[in-house]
Amino acid sequence: MLIKILILILSVLNSTFVLAQNFERIIKKSSLSQSDLGICVVNHDKVLFETNRDKQMTPASLSKILTAVGVLKTLSPEDKFESKLLITDLPQNGVLKGPIYVQTGADPSFISETLWVLVNHFVREGVTQIKGPIIVDHSLFDEKLYDESRQSVRVDRAYDAPVSAASFNWNSVNVYVRPGLKGDSAKVYLDPESDYFVLSNQMKTVSGRDVDIQISLDKVGSKEKVTVHGKIGAQSPEAVKFASIQNPVQWLGANLISFLKQRGISVENTVVQTGVPPSQARVVAKTQGWSLFELVDGMMKYSNNFIAEMLVKQLAARAGTKRASIDDGLREIKATLKKEYKIESYQLLNPSGFTNKNKISACDLSLLLDRAQKDFSVGPALISSMPRPGGEGTLKRRMKGGEHLIRAKTGLLSGVIGLAGYASNGKGEVFSFAFMYNGTESGEERARNLFDQLALEVTKL
């Protein structure tokens, strides 16, 4: 028995030595400055390789790993958030004189399908006309649509969507563009359609297959003007872009009105208001969205900033905090990571990583991954949520050969590249790793290629 143990120890030491040699060779070949790198590989709480072990670096979207662990440890993967329609008056001959209230439960997955189900349930009340106002309840969260922890410059892109307890379709609109005849205007469609938008179509159809779509949004009272300009080739297939909206309450209310009308229910008062249903309000329709497991999966595989911030505010709300904020939710995450995983030397200001101010060392992130993997209440869901090479998400076209051996989260900001997750050697051993680059934009592609090579190298242990 003693001989077998010694052989195993020597084998591990030899593998670690070979890993270090190969890592150092690959890193040197990349021509990146080691001072710009944070690299760590961990197995069973032991560091097998490290570069700048304790250096605090910007993780970008690797921050979502901390968010995912905190959320999965605190809530149940089966948890769902409930959405409701409520009324205070009884309909008379199909006419509802009083208001109709909508509560989305601050569900990040409150999308067109969910709203359609709500409206379909409401149809059975026999209402054909609503004279009262549409009232949106957004009281579960605070009123900060763009938390100060994000980068300060706003953009009309889906990854910078506002966060509100009254949210719909990720608070983004789909803009579909199809070519017309050469020289004519292109065809532009907004999905979902509602009176919230005023569309200005400035897209032109040109020869060939080139596509260049630019979108800008401007407030027009309680609505938004969407200007779509650029070009699309006459031989090009349909193209789609996603743009963030600016007023979640009005956006949700306008789409509720649109869906009601589609089911033959007229809405007389189209001015959307905000408020909380009184205690006597009656629930006339309710449904649930995605499970927490599905939400974390979407957050990780597609690096969805909106889901990350919504879930962190949900943590605070579930803990009993009124008008829950990002800071409230982050306190819950930090307490969990300290108590359950002994990780506390980091700075987490934004749960999605949409800031340069988040900081953590590569080895602390690797140790968190290692410890979370061994926590049966978190590990299976966490590993499953991460992209894999060749699969859905941000690793679809990366690390060929690692399809069944690597699960990892990516990170990207200007001058920041990250890759962190798990690699298996196919022999029952799973290694945790975190690779971070904080340098110049010119080194981003080399860093990305370096990290792919290092992850594949871990699978050879």
Image (cartoon, rainbow, N blue to C red):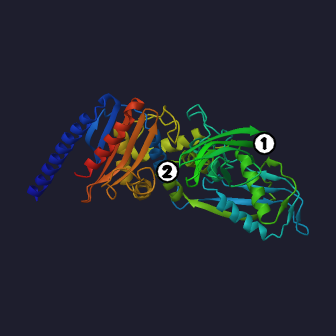
Counting labels gives 2
**Distance in Å between CA atoms under marks 1 and 2:** 31 Å
**Quadrant including the N terminus:** bottom left
Q: Which residue is mark 1?
A: 222
Identify residue for label 2: 302
Residue 345 falls in which quadrant of the image?
A: top left
Disc with the residue nearer the chain's start (1 vs 2): 1
Residue 340 in the image: x percent, y percent? 42, 47
User: Residue type at mark 2?
Assistant: Tyr
Crowding near the residue tagged with mark 1, few <14, some 14–19, many ≥20 C-alpha atoms within 10 Å: some
Q: Which quadrant of the figure has residue 222? A: top right
Query: Quick check: 154 above or below 212?
Result: above
What is the x, y in percent for residue 61? 47, 42
Check the image and report above or below for 87 versus 43: below
Front residue of 183/127: it is 183
Callout 2 crowding tier (Cα within 10 Å): few <14, some 14–19, many ≥20: some
Residue for point 81% across, 69% down: 125
Left or right side of 373 for 164? right
